[in-house]
Each structure stands twice: as C-alpha cells, then as structure tokens.
Image (cartoon, grey):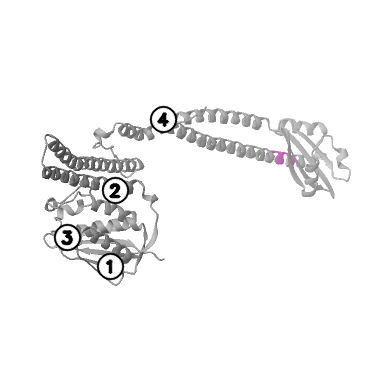
Amino acid sequence: MSFTMKLRERLSLSFSIVASLTLLFFGFAMFFFFSQYRKNEFNNRLKQRVEVTEKMFLERENFSDQAFRTIQEQFLNKLPEETEEVVELTQDFRSQLVLEYPESFLENVTNNEEAFFERNDRQGSGKVFHVGGKDYLVLLTAKDDIGVRLMDHFLTIIFIGLAICIIAMVLVSYFVSGWILNPIVQKISQANSISATNLHERLNVGNAEDEMGQLAIAFNNLLDRVAEAFDTQRSFIDSASHEIRNPLTTIIGEAEFALQRERTQEEYIHSLSSISEEADRLNTLVNSLLKLSGINTRKASYPEEVFSIANVLESSINKLHSLNPDQKVIVSGTELQLKAKGNIHLMETAFINLLDNACKFSFNKPVEVNVTDGPDNNFTVIIKDQGIGIPPEDIPKVTQPFHRAHNARKITGIGIGIPLTAKIIELHNGMLEFDSELSVGTEVKVMLPKSAF
C-alpha cells in the first residue's frame, strides 16, 4: 500500500532533515576542532615538560638524588600518569628504553629532533638535545585526563543539544509550514466552493506580488475564461435551439394544416413546398453545426497539403457560381502564385462563405478579390464588396455563432458561415479582419502564412 504525504508533511520533513543534517555537521565539526585544539594544547604542555626535563637533566649533577626527587615532586607540575625517560642517542638506544613507544614516533624524533604521538588515551613528546658532544633523547608521556573528560562531557552536550534541536526543528517546521501553506488551504476551500451556479465568485488575491497572489490571479483568469466559455456555450445552445425550432415549427404546422382535411392539389403542393424549404434550411443548419463542431474537436485530423491560393479561389468562385450564376467576383493581384499549406476543402469552404456573404449583402454587385504579399512571411487575400456594411458595434461579434447584425436580419442566413470561416482560418494559423462602413461596403482580410514548397 502506497503512502502519500501532504505538502505540509513533505515540507516539514524536508526542512527538518536539511536542518538536522546541518546541525549534525556543525556539532561534529565543533567536536572535531575542539578535539584538535585539546590535543595541540596538551602537546604544548608535553613540550614544556620536555624542556623542563632537559634543563633538570643539565643541572642534575648540582643536586643529590634526594634533592632532585624533592624538586620534581614539590616544585614541578607533573602531568597525570606522567612518564619520562632520558637516554643517550646511540645506535642501540631502543634497548635502553623502559617503555614501549611507536616505531614511527621514534624514527620521526631521531630524524627531526622533535616529535609527538598519540596512542589510545596517552600522548607523548620527544626531543633530542646535545650536551658535551653527545646526543640525548628525552621521551615524555602522560594522560590528558581533564581534557578527555571535558571532551566526553562536550560530546554528551552535543548529542543532547542536537536531539533537543532536532525535535524543536520538527515541531517548528510543522507549524511554520502550516502557517506558510495556510493561504493555499484557504484558496483551495474557496476554489472548491465555486461551481457552475456561482462562477462569478473569485479567489482573494491578497498580495499580488508574491507567488500566492499570482496563483490566485492565474486561477481567477482561468475562471474568467471558463465563465466566458459557459456564457458562449449557453448563448450557442439558446441560439441553436431557436434556429432549429423555427423550421421544425413550420414543418409541423404545415403538415398538421395539410392533414386537417382534404385539400386541393395546389394547396398540397404549397404545403409540401414550405415543408421542403424549411427542411432544406434545417439540413443546412445541422450540417453547418456539425462542421463547426468538427473543427473545434478534431483540429489535428484534417489532411494537409501545399496548395496555390489561385486554385483555391478559382474553385471557390466556380462552386459559388453553380449556386448563384448572378454573383460577380473579380480577382486581381500579382501574387496569385503564392502557396499555403493546409486542407484545401476547408479553405474552399471558408472562401465560399466569405464570397457568398459579400455577394448576398451587396445584392450581387461586383465583389473584388485581391491577393497581396505581406510581412513576416504572410500574404493577404482581400475581399471587398459594395454592400450594406456592418455596424461598428457588431464587428467584434461577427465571429460568434448565430450573431447577426440588426441591418442584416431581413436577409436570409443562419449566422454560422463567418464563425465557421474564422475557425478554419485559425486552424491554418491565419487571421481574419473586418473593416466596414455602413451603406458603403465591407472589406475582409484573410492573412495566411506562406509555404516555401
């Protein structure tokens, strides 16, 4: 079974581990340096005792044996369990030694004339001095009982202090991490209280300069986008329901009217014509909705190829003429050889929608299409009509499904063509811009990236 810790526990544990390791390192570093200091201090005391022994040896002949021992015991501060030896430095001086010393120490002292050693709890010092043309070796050892006891006591203090500090660090880090994470906990509680019924609520930002404030701002921006998507979806569903209900109501009404009693052939033909017209309208609406939904949900599934913008425009104009021979489209420009990459059928759908709108809202007056080269490896297709124009307040809304300007509601349409075109252009990494003047006309710019192949 897996064990998952919350962020507070992870932060507390991580901080405690790092702090504990730091304290352990600091404690043992102090112990190490203090131990070195104690050893060096005791070596200095040994060195002083060696020098005293050397001087006493030089003055030995001036004192009797009894006087010499009295001076050593009463006036010289001997070290704990001190031993001292003075031997003449000859080839076989090792045989004259009473105590056993490390061989490396003896070699070091004979070569360098002074050396120290440490073995177990005993430290020693040695020095070579010269008297009357002879070399003598002073060897002195002792135990640093006071220093060792101090080190043991110091080590105990370190362990107790570290244990207390680590426990305190765990507790403090737990409460500090809780205090630090408390704004997140509050924001989580606020976020959990927000649902589809209260999307207008937002998290408290607090300090916008720190990470918590920036997190709240990012989440609030996300809620703004979600709320906008909800509103768009709600508006889309309401508009779609309304648009679908109208032809269905007409179809059902005409069918019920025709079935109420026997009618003349002309009346049946009129009812069936109305039903067929509304069915065609409903079929166009459903197909447009399916195309729009397909582009939104399956952007990556459309095959792409390099195509000539001239070929796409020619194909779009031909299909447009097959639907309405009265429409007049004039193509110009010196950049018709430019190529783009994408799905040809989708691009034809986009240009058919734009050209059909231009012709429809200008009542079949000539529509101009011009292709120009642009900056940043782009080119622009400009479609200009002589129609009724778009009110300035409606231009930002023309890409919303089912939106129709107030001056266009008497003209046949369902409000899907431009939103579908905008999605197609977006799918091809392009841009769609509108510039319009009432009763003068509308200019639509389609900017697409050029293909190098």
Q: Position of residue 307 (x, y in %)?
A: 37, 63
Q: Residue tagged by mark 4?
A: 175
Q: Secondary structure at mark 1?
A: strand
Whether residue 47 appears in magenta in the rendering, the answer is: yes
Which segment is the magenta one?
45-50
Tell me the amino acid under the disc marked 3: Ser
Callout 4 secondary element: helix
On screen, residue 127 versus residue 26, left or right, reads: right
Callout 2: 10 Å neighbours few (<14), some, many (20+)?
A: many
- On residue 371, which mark appears? 1
- Amino acid at pointer 4: Phe
Callout 2: SS: helix
Kindly identify the amino acid type of the residue bearing the numbered disc 2: Leu
Disc 4 to disc 3, C-alpha distance: 63 Å
Task: Give the SS element for disc 3.
Answer: strand
Q: Are marks 4 and 2 in contact (CB under 8 Å)?
A: no
Q: Is residue 127 left or right of residue 290?
A: right
* Cα separation between marks 3 and 1: 19 Å
From the viewer's perspective, is 116 left or right of 348? right
Magenta stretch: residue 335 in it?
no
Which residue is denoted by mark 2 in the rendering?
292
In the rendered structure, find residue 436 and report the number of the disc placed on it: 3
Main SS of the magenta segment?
A: helix
